[in-house]
Image (tube, grey):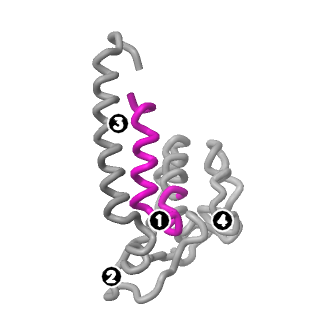
Amino acid sequence: MRDRWQPTYVSLCAKTSPAELGWDVYEEAAGLMGQHKTSHMLLEVLGFKAIVCSPALGLEDHLPTTPYCGPCAPASLRVLGNDTTPLKSPGGLSHFDIRGTAGEALSHCMTAATYRRLCATEEEQAAVERAVEKAMTDVGAAAMLLPAGAP
């Protein structure tokens, strides 16, 4: 059932998460760390997601160029940009001096005005909502038709 829902979820995220925020890459990286049992180092390596903020918090955009924003992410890892290859194997991070690196975490934000400009319009969001409702209905209906024990 998850496989049937995944494309709808990706579509929904794309409409509410401007690519400039890098949330998709962050989520991929975080998921890969979990798969390889390194999620205990998530904040040290990735730091926090970029945020959408009000003028009281940020007057200009500071957009991420890499998901490796944590205080223990060395320059050699940050220079990889959005390449998550080191996270795709269990020992991939061992090639970087994670434990020996201590520095500043990179903080990223997008102003609310930029977010509003880059996000889907209300009409597009309504269309996505209708598509999600239909997909969930279709997935639920299909699941009721599956034989017991089927994925």
Give the foreground label among 4 and 1.
Answer: 1
Give the foreground label among 2 and 1.
Answer: 1
2 drawn magenta: yes
- Determine which residue is flagged by label 2: 54
State if disc 1 and disc 4 touch (CB < 8 Å): no
Left or right of 58? Residue 100 is right
Kindly report the distance in space between the C-alpha atoms of the residues bearing marks 2 and 3: 34 Å
Q: Quadrant of the C terminus?
A: top left
Residue 34: x percent and y percent?
A: 49, 45
**Which mark is drawn over residue 127?**
none
Position above or below: 114 against 136:
below
Kindly report the distance in space between the C-alpha atoms of the residues bearing marks 2 and 1: 17 Å
Residue 140: x percent and y percent?
A: 29, 27
In the image, what residue type sits under mark 1?
A: Pro
- Residue at the spot 45% in from the left edge and 47% down from the top edge: 10
- Residue at the spot 54% in from the left edge and 57% down from the top edge: 25
Q: Nearer the viewer, residue 107 or 126?
A: 126
- Determine which residue is flagged by label 4: 81
Kindly report the distance in space between the C-alpha atoms of the residues bearing marks 4 and 1: 17 Å
Kindly report the distance in space between the C-alpha atoms of the residues bearing marks 2 and 4: 27 Å
Q: Nearer the viewer, residue 59 or 76?
A: 59
Residue numbers of the magenta segment: 1-25
Kindly report the distance in space between the C-alpha atoms of the residues bearing marks 3 and 1: 23 Å
- Determine which residue is flagged by label 1: 18
